[in-house]
């Protein structure tokens, strides 16, 4: 094993943990939609139904979720959404992130209609830690794609070792 900076070693080690890919959406204080790609999403509890996501403090989504009771959506991506993930992870900003895909923009929190699942949430708690906010959201509503009963059609987008993969 090589000796490296602990932060860099953590990043290298975590690259070996396969994660589902999600896009987090919200609306900012001006009502403009914003989005970011995230792989750090996990369930917290089923009573109350809640999820946790880690959000970099340099993102518009982090800024949009500073107010208590802010709304956001966690969109669970399938293999067909790789380009959407890239668009929401790099370079593009603002409305250009929503030019690709079947986004429903009429909701309080925009959501991707073809996502495997969409979790509409209300901010419950934000804990600042290092460069990120640990956001806990109460789930208000869940939309599950019609493929739920057909295991052959459920093909999540997975991130591992710096690359996308599918099952």
Image (cartoon, rainbow, N blue to C red):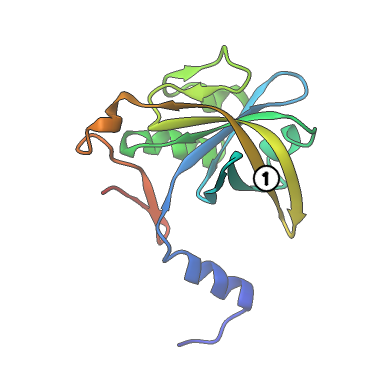
For this rendering, which residue is in front, 156 or 30?
A: 156
Return the x and y of residue 116 as percentages of the image width and height: 38, 32
Disc 1, SS: strand
Please give the residue where the numbered disc 1 appears in the rendered image: 135
Residue 60 at least partly seen? no
In the figure, is residue 85 to the left or right of 154?
right
Outermost residue, front side: 47
Does residue 37 appear anywhere in the picture?
A: yes
Quadrant of image for the N terminus:
bottom left
- Image quadrant where residue 78 sits: top left
Q: Residue furthest top?
A: 106
Residue 60 x/y as whole percent: 69, 35
Q: Position of residue 64 (x, y in %)?
A: 73, 32
Q: Between residues 143 and 16, which one lies in front from this camera angle? A: 143
Q: Residues within 10 Å of mark 1 (few under 14, many from 20)?
A: many
Residue 19 position, x and y percent, is 43, 53
Q: Is residue 134 above or below residue 32?
A: below
Question: Residue at point 74% right, 43% down?
Answer: 125
């Amino acid at each position: 094993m090589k000796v490296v900076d602990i932060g860099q070693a953590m990043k290298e080690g975590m690259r070996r943990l396969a994660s589902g890919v999600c896009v987090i959406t919200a609306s900012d204080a001006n009502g403009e939609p914003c989005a970011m790609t995230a792989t750090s999403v996990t369930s917290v509890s089923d009573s109350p139904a809640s999820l946790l996501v880690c959000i970099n403090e340099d993102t518009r989504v982090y800024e949009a979720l500073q107010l208590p009771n802010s709304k956001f959506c966690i969109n669970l991506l399938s293999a067909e959404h790789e380009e959407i993930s890239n668009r929401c992870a790099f370079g593009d900003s603002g409305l250009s992130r929503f030019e690709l895909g079947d986004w429903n923009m009429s909701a309080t929190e925009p959501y991707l209609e073809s996502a495997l699942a969409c979790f509409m949430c209300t901010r419950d708690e934000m804990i600042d830690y290092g460069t990120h906010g640990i956001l806990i959201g109460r789930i208000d509503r869940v939309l599950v794609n019609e493929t739920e009963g057909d295991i052959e059609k459920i093909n999540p987008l997975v991130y591992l070792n710096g690359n996308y993969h599918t099952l």
